[in-house]
Amino acid sequence: MTDFMKWLYPRYIRPYLDEVPREGYELWFSLLDGELRAAEREDLDRVLEFTAVHAFLLGLRTGAGLREVTPR
């Protein structure tokens, strides 16, 4: 992961994810909050960071590729 992505995640991506409504997923989020120990929570946060950053990059790449095939 680049330094830019390490900077972008806590300043843009994570705040966005924290604000997204969890409709239909409340049960699973509450189960995780109640069951994870501190070390496991840290591990989960790192996995979330990795996944979110790569999903963000995929969106950028896909969006850039769509520009070539979409009519203007």
Image (cartoon, rainbow, N blue to C red):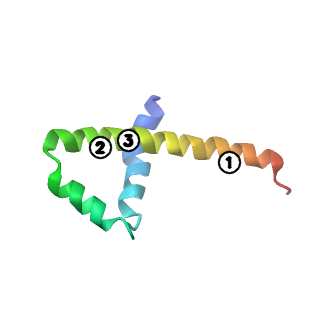
- Per the model, the C-alpha gap separating discs 3 and 1 is 21 Å
Element type at mark 3: helix
Q: Which mark is residue 45?
A: 2
Q: Residue furthest right?
A: 71
Q: Is residue 36 above or below residue 6?
A: below
Q: Position of residue 48 (x, y in %)?
A: 36, 44
Q: Nearer the viewer, residue 11 or 28?
A: 28
Q: Are marks 2 and 3 in contact (CB under 8 Å)?
A: yes
The residue that mark 1 highlights is 63
- Per the model, the C-alpha gap separating discs 2 and 3 is 6 Å
Amino acid type, callout 3: Glu
- Per the model, the C-alpha gap separating discs 2 and 1 is 27 Å
Q: Residue at x 40, y 56 (%)?
A: 17
Q: Is residue 35 above or below residue 8?
A: below
Q: Position of residue 68 (x, y in %)?
A: 81, 45
Q: Nearer the viewer, residue 10 or 25?
A: 25
Which quadrant of the rendered structure holds the C terminus?
Answer: bottom right
Who comes first in sequence, dot 2 or dot 1?
A: 2
Q: Position of residue 62 (x, y in %)?
A: 66, 45
Few, some or many residues within 10 Å of mark 1 (<14, 14–19, 20+)? few
Which quadrant of the rendered structure holds the N terminus?
Answer: top left
Q: Are marks 2 and 1 in contact (CB under 8 Å)?
A: no
Please identify the quarter of the rendering in which residue 50 is found: top left
Q: Residue at x 86, y 56 (%)?
A: 71
Q: Which mark is residue 2?
A: none
The residue that mark 3 highlights is 49
Who comes first in sequence, dot 3 or dot 1?
A: 3
Amino acid type, callout 2: Asp
